[in-house]
Amino acid sequence: MDNARWWMVAVVVGAFVAGCEDISDEDEVVILDTDGDGIRDDIDRDTTAENTFTWSTLVFATPAATTGVFGSAIARELIGADVFAAQITVRNDIRGAVRPWHVHIGTCAQGGAIVGLDADYPRLLVDLDGVARNRVRIPVRLDPAATFHIDVHESDAAFNTIIACGDLELQ
């Protein structure tokens, strides 16, 4: 990587870290509005590191991206639960864009099947500031011995084009 590109990556990562919200609150898993009533619901507010599996990642633009989109993602599951929660935040995207996103089996380099169904993941809607956030609850148990990644697709029409990806790491 040449010096100019390395400097650009360092600036983007630094800006991201400085402006990133804390997505790893210890007193809650991922707060969701599962029934669409505008009230955020909890998976379980009484969670600790001892009774949850937590995966997290930074999400970076792929060579297919038309912007320098970047972000963060987390997946969390109560041990023994048959459901996991995931949330993603992306920044520096095209305002008004509608992006499919998913947790997948495997790594960004390998690719892999969607965990759950495409319909389980509401689309990311990019706001006027180029930011999109979403949270989901997927009725699937994640295997802590497996590898997972989160990706963001260009659009429903260009579903095979991945514009951002991050390999989830078990914490």
Image (tube, rainbow, N blue to C red):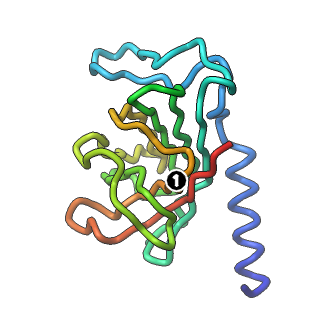
Q: In which quarter of the image is the C terminus?
A: top right
Residue 140: x %, y % from top left: 36, 37
* Residue pointed to by mark 1: 146
Give the residue drawn at x 29%, y 70%. Answer: 160
135 relative to 18 in the view: left or right:
left
Does residue 68 lie above or below 21 as drawn?
below
125 relative to 12 in the view: left or right:
left
Front position in the image: 132 or 82: 82
Residue 124: x %, y % from top left: 36, 46
Answer with the quarter of the image where residue 73 lies.
Answer: top right
Does residue 10 lie above or below 51 as drawn?
below
142 relative to 60 in the view: left or right:
left
The residue lying furthest to the bottom in this view is: 2
Does residue 164 lie above or below 125 as drawn?
below
At mark 1, the secondary structure is loop
Q: Give the number of marks.
A: 1
131 relative to 158 in the view: left or right:
right
Specify few, some or many for label 1: CA neighbours under 10 Å numbering under 14, 14-19, or 20 or more. Answer: few
Does residue 98 lie above or below 75 as drawn?
below
Q: In which quarter of the image is the N terminus?
A: bottom right
Q: Which amino acid type corresponds to the residue marked 1 in the rendered image?
A: Ala
Front position in the image: 112 or 119: 112
Residue 148: x %, y % from top left: 50, 54
Front position in the image: 145 or 134: 145
Give the residue drawn at x 38%, y 31%. Answer: 137
Give the residue drawn at x 36%, y 49%. Answer: 115
Give the residue drawn at x 71%, y 58%. Answer: 13
Residue 110: x %, y % from top left: 47, 72
